[in-house]
Image (cartoon, grey):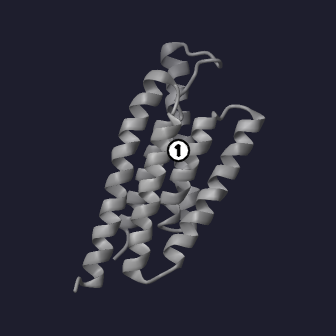
């Protein structure tokens, strides 16, 4: 029988490695093509859901799957508002399902701070682009990489501070 702590560590590690791997692939595509392919985002999301389901089974804790599901829906709804009002692409809305899920595996605070970090990181880069490279307001900015990085930063901060 596998020790519960070992199982928890293994499932958490698998989940984060899956997310980071897919985030790197999606970021590269978004930077080059300014799009997040639906099929790839769906595969990333499905893997996160499956890894979290295994994690919830190992922990015997239903909230380990319910909280990320609700956080995922909440993040996507917020990003959908950003899409309707302008500035957020539909690929980012779909990727928010993944980022909300991942941050929801940590805490509601992480859901908030991970997405705030995404916007702050993007703001720093865009400001630099305006100041150094003469970017105009119309300059397209791939937001997917910032979303992924914000989740990774918030996840590292939250998980690094645990125990």
Classify residue 16 by image quadrant. bottom left
User: As displayed, is residue 107 above or below residue 128?
Assistant: below
| Residue occupied by mark 1 | 118
Q: x%, y% of residue 142?
A: 52, 29
Tell me the residue at 53%/44% (across/down).
118
Badge 1 density bin: few <14, some 14–19, many ≥20, Cα 10 Å: many
Q: Is residue 85 left or right of residue 29?
A: right
Residue located farthest toward the top when viewing the structure as drawn: 134
Position of the C terminus by quadrant: bottom left
Quick one: 84 or 125, which is closer to the camera? 84
Tell me the residue at 50%/46% (across/down).
42
Tell me the residue at 45%/40% (across/down).
40
Classify residue 88 by image quadrant. top right
Tell me the residue at 68%/31% (across/down).
87
Q: Is residue 159 left or right of residue 129?
A: left
Quick one: 107 or 25, which is closer to the camera? 25
User: As displayed, is residue 135 above or below residue 62?
Assistant: above
Q: x%, y% of residue 120?
A: 55, 42
Position of the N terminus by quadrant: bottom left
Q: Secondary structure at mark 1?
A: helix
């Amino acid at each position: 029988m596998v020790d519960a702590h070992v199982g928890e560590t293994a499932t958490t590690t698998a989940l984060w490695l899956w997310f980071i791997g897919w985030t790197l692939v999606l970021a590269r595509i978004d930077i080059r093509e300014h799009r997040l392919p639906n099929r790839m985002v769906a595969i990333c999301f499905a893997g996160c859901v499956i890894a979290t389901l295994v994690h919830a089974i190992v922990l015997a804790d239903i909230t380990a799957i319910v909280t990320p599901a609700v956080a995922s829906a909440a993040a996507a709804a917020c990003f959908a508002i950003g899409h309707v009002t302008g500035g957020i692409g539909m690929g980012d809305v779909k990727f928010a399902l993944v980022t909300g899920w991942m941050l929801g595996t940590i805490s509601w605070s992480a859901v908030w701070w991970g997405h705030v970090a995404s916007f702050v990181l993007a703001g720093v880069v865009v400001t630099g682009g305006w100041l150094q490279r003469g970017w105009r307001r119309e300059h397209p900015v791939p937001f997917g990489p910032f979303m992924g990085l914000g989740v990774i930063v918030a996840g590292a901060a939250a998980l690094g501070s645990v125990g």
